[in-house]
Each structure stands twice: as structure tokens, then as C-alpha cells.
Image (tube, rainbow, N blue to C red):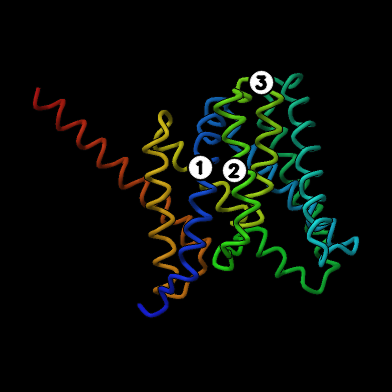
Amino acid sequence: MNPASLEPGILLPAFAAGLLVLASHVPLGQAVLRRGIVFLDLAIAQIAGLGVVLAHSLGGEDDVWLTQAGAVAAALLGALLLRYTERIAGARQEAIIGVAFVGAASGMLILISQDPHGAEHLQDLLVGQILWTTWDGLLPLAGVTALMLVAWFALNLRASPLGFYLLFALTITASVQVVGIYLVFASLIVPALAWSEGLARGYGLGALGYALGLAISGLFDLPAGAAIVLALIGVAVLLKGVAQLSSSGQSSSK
């Protein structure tokens, strides 16, 4: 354990990145559960990752704009395709989403296998580089998050099936490059599983999970992404258990 490793200059931007991700992902996660398409985020994130790797393979590894264009284009095309299949597949949509995920993952692995730094790129896409986040680097994510929240709540695009898929794709594309696929999935699903309605509890659970995971990562020199995922799960289980015990106690006292 090394308390000196809890460097505010590193942890605070990382925590701010987590809060930005949670701001958009908690309402998205609740909508995903209501629609019964839990693995949509994994599929879209994986498709966006395929776009990033494809852009790199075309010589855009040092070109930020080409990388972003590849990620956004791939995610939007994936979202449009999955929206189309939702209209015709009905109950089979979740299976199609799973096929899209494994297809994109396999394509990405084939492309990465030709890259001498492929293992590093794969790890970055899966667990992210949240500890490398800077305040300036948060500006694109903050902009996408603000636009998503306005479109979601003020413009009510969440009520449009196509609007939902497109917003989902853009939001996931922005966040997966900061926190990775695993944290994107956990940020969407874990708070929504614990509290399927109402945002305040979901935001609180997520913020506590990110804070605890970052602290554990710093203290014990552990991978930040994996530590935060486990912290989110642990906090969700603990808070849900306490809530159920409290509810049972109130019921038995009546």
C-alpha cells in the first residue's frame, strides 16, 4: 500500500472523466434495460473499436481526426444496422446484437494481429487509459456529453427509436476511447441494475464506485479500469443489500 501514490493531479481528472461518463450512461443504461437490449453497448463499443483499429491500419495512428472519424463512422453504421434489424428481428434482436459484437471483435483481432503494438492497442480498448486523462483531454467528452443530455432530456430524442440508437452510438464512441469497453459496459448496466428508475441513486452509486476504484488502484498499484469495474459491482451489491434489509425491517415493524 502506498498512500503517496494518491496523486490529485492524476486522480481528479480521471474522476471527472468518470462523472462525465456516468452523466450520460446512467440514463442510457436504464433505457437499455427497459428495451431488453443489454449487450447493445458492448456491440456498439466493439464496432467503434474496430473503426479505431481500421483507421490505424490505414495509417491514421498519429492522426487524431482520422481515428475519430473511423470510430464515429463505424459506430453510426453499426447503430443504423442494428436499428434496422430491431424492426425486422423482434425477439431475436439480442442474438443479432451478440453476433455483431463477436463479429466486430473478431475483425478487430485480425487487424491487430498484423500490428506489432496490437496487444497494447487491445488492452487500451478493453480497459481504457483513464489515469492518462488530462483536463484538456476531457473537453471532447464533455462536449459530447452535454449535447447528448440536451438531446435526451430537452429534445426528447430518447422517444425516437432511431434517435436513441444514434445518440447511443455517438455517446459510446466518445466514452470508450477514454475509459475502455469494460468500464463503458459497467457504467451503463451496473447502476441501472441496482436502480432501474430515478437517476439520483444511479449517479450516486456510480460516483462512489469510481472514487473507490480509483483510490484502490492508486493505493495498490492496480489497473484502474479493472479496479473501478469491481468497485462499481461491489458498491451496487452493498447498497442494494442495505436497501433490501432496510425495506424488510420496515415491513416487519408494521
Residue receiving disc 1: 23
Residue 76 horizontal/vertical position (percent): 77, 38
Q: Earlier in the sequence, mark 2 or mark 3?
A: 2
Which amino acid, mark 1?
Ala
Q: Report the label total.
A: 3
Q: Pointers 1 and 2 in contact (CB under 8 A)?
A: yes
Report the residue marked by disc 3: 160
Element assignment for label 3 = loop
Quarter holding residue 39: top right
Q: Which residue type carries mark 2? A: Thr
User: Residue at point 59% right, 60% down?
Assistant: 127
Residue 237 vs residue 201, the one in the foreground? 201
Q: On the image, numbered disc 2 is attached to which residue?
A: 145
Q: Residue furthest left?
A: 253
Mark 2 Cα-neighbour bin, 10 Å: few <14, some 14–19, many ≥20: many
- Percent x, y of residue 139: 62, 54
At numbered mark 2, what does the secondary structure look like: helix, strand or loop?
Answer: helix
Q: Earlier in the sequence, mark 1 or mark 3?
A: 1
Three-letter code, disc 3: Ser
Q: Cα distance, mark 1 to mark 3?
A: 20 Å
**Residue 182 appears at what percent x and percent y?**
58, 53
Q: Residues within 10 Å of mark 3 (few under 14, many from 20)?
A: few
